[in-house]
Amino acid sequence: MKLILALVKKEFIQLGRDPRLLGFIVVMPIILTTLFGFALKLEPDNVKMAYVDKDPSMFSNLIKTNIWSEGYFNLYEVAEVSDIENEIRLGRARAGLYIPGNFSAELIENNQPSVTLYIDGTMPSLATAMDNNTSAITDDAVTSDMYFSDPNEPAVVIAQDPFNLVVKTLFNPEKIETWFFLPGVVGILIMQVALILTSTTVVRERENNTLEQLLVSPMTRSQFILGKIIPYVIISLIDFYAILGFSWLVFDLPHPNSYAVLFLLAVTYLGALISMGLAISTISQTQQQAIFISIFVLIPSILLSGFIFPIEAMPSYIQPVAYIIPFTYFVEIIRGILLKGNELFELITQFMALLGFAIFFTTFSILRFRKTLV
């Protein structure tokens, strides 16, 4: 027992000699718990809805006014039905509403006209939430003023609902959850490989006392950094296509319209991740520190990127955090490529964001690295 206690004491002393690691152990769980406690919510607010009203009348205004008052949808007008689908495809809207030109006439005749609700099906949790909030369109506050009967005319059978609500789920009409999760899972697995491997690479050289041999060579800082990055880019690319190939074969994941755009995504995303991992390695003193920092990056990336929980569901003061995470842009791009059929020019902003991350972290690593032993 004394030997065990002595070993326990020795481990605590060892931890005390690494205050940075001790800080990660204590502080990181508190930060993450606080962040997730405020941020994670399945039910979004103010979902952007593009609408087309071909019959601007008292009746269509009843529908739109009630949607506004409910506060769940945030409406803005577009010209045509094709614009609704395009807005959803480009990610500017999550839902759409189409009121046809004969709405009032059919309503007066008790012919049950149809109103169409369009839903972005690339995120089933969000689509389900929107399905559950269609009451803003069909509840009694809207429909009670839409019944018509004339006591001087023969009795008319009035339908229970004055109009039909037709729900169309775009891009994933069957709401197949594997189509939603698998593209993001590819990014998570690659992130795990790229971050863990590269975040320990410089620290490992220091701990193994092999960094001296590199420091006395004529190698420049840029050559050292690039030499560390390239092997992991190759390894991660192989993993990327292996995981995607397995998903195509086993889970029937949709194929992209352009494999060149998919390859460009792989290169820019891996460049951002590996340069980030290398930056972590240059600021870490031990491999344990590097791994802890990588985990600190990995967990928020999964939960705050819109992969599982909609960004729209997060408080407004938390949402900016999502946009400083490379995985956020990867999720938007790969869903656009595989599910929505987006072209490169439609995703150029997200690609530029990933490229910016890669340039920033690579530059940081080169400036941080010093050809001296600490």
Image (cartoon, helix red, strand yellow):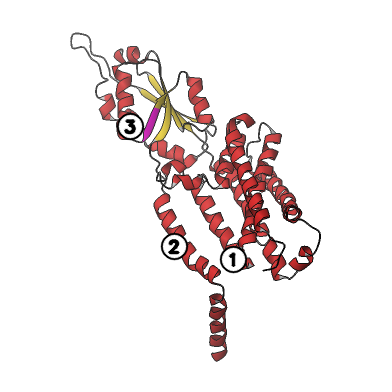
Front residue of 223 and 46: 223
Q: Which residues, given as a range, are shown in magenta?
A: 71-75
Residue 136 numbered mark, or none: 3
Q: Secondary structure at mark 3?
A: helix
Nearer the observer: mark 3 or 1; the answer is: 1
At label 1, counting other C-alpha atoms closer than 10 Å, the crowd grade (few under 14, some 14-19, many 20 or more) is many
Residue wearing tag 1? 289
Residue 309 makes an appearance in the image: no
- Alpha carbon distance from label 3 to label 1: 51 Å
Main secondary structure of the magenta stretch: strand
Nearer the observer: mark 3 or 2; the answer is: 2
Question: Residue 137 appears at what percent x and percent y?
Answer: 34, 28
Horizontal side of 61 relative to 273 (left or right) equals left
Q: Secondary structure at mark 2?
A: helix
- Tags 2 and 1 touching, CB below 8 Å: no
- Sooner in the amino-acid sequence: mark 3 or mark 1: 3
- Sooner in the amino-acid sequence: mark 2 or mark 1: 2
Question: What residue lies at 47% left-to-right and 68% top-to-bottom?
Answer: 26
Residue 162 lies in the magenta stretch = no
Q: Quadrant of residue 342?
A: top right
Q: What is the three-letter code of the residue carrying label 1?
A: Gln
At label 3, counting other C-alpha atoms closer than 10 Å, the crowd grade (few under 14, some 14-19, many 20 or more) is many
Residue wearing tag 2? 30
* Quadrant housing the N terminus: bottom right
